[in-house]
Image (tube, grey):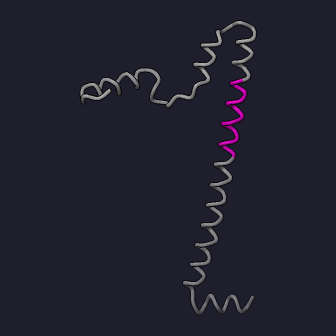
Amino acid sequence: MDKLIEAIAEDPSMFVNVLFALSSIVIIGATIVLCMRIGLKMKREQEISRREIAAYVAEGSISAEDAESLLQPRPWFSRGKTAEKIKEACRGLGGL
């Protein structure tokens, strides 16, 4: 332990570099774990939604076509008034 303290006293930049490297590893590891947990939760919720929609189709509450449209992945901007505003803006520019 004394040698470590002496080495830090002689060259404090080495201590800062090691501390930075270790903290970077911890932060990157925590970020990876958090992203994995979020992905698993999203997948689990998607599967629950699929099962609920299948149950509604089985009992006849919704048609198979409606269920299929609910299960199709859509980007967030393709729904509602935001999509209409984007399409209007693109038409004004000569697109869509």
**Could you say where residue 6 lies in the image, as x and y percent from the top left?**
66, 92
Residue 7 location, quadrant:
bottom right
In the displayed structure, does residue 14 sit left or right of residue 92? right
Placement of the C terminus among the 4 image quadrants: top left
In the image, is residue 77 above or below residue 5? above
**Could you say where residue 49 lies in the image, as x and y percent from the top left?**
69, 25
Identified at 24% across, 26% down, the residue is 92
In front of the other: 83 or 34 = 83
**Could you say where residue 48 lies in the image, as x and y percent from the top left?**
72, 27
Residue 20 part of the magenta segment: no
In the displayed structure, does residue 9 sit left or right of residue 40? left
In the image, is residue 31 above or below residue 10? above
Identified at 57% across, 78% down, the residue is 17
Placement of the N terminus among the 4 image quadrants: bottom right
Residue 43 part of the magenta segment: yes
**Could you say where residue 66 lies in the image, as x and y percent from the top left?**
60, 13
In the displayed structure, does residue 48 sit left or right of residue 76? right
Residue 65 location, quadrant:
top right
Could you tell me what secondary structure mostly forms the magenta stretch?
A: helix
In front of the other: 79 or 72 = 72
Residue that protrudes farthest toward the top in the picture: 60
In the image, is residue 46 above or below residue 8? above
In front of the other: 26 or 12 = 26
Residue 47 location, quadrant:
top right
Identified at 72% across, 20% down, the residue is 52
Count how many numbered circles sit on residues in the image.
Answer: 0
Magenta stretch: give its range.
37-50
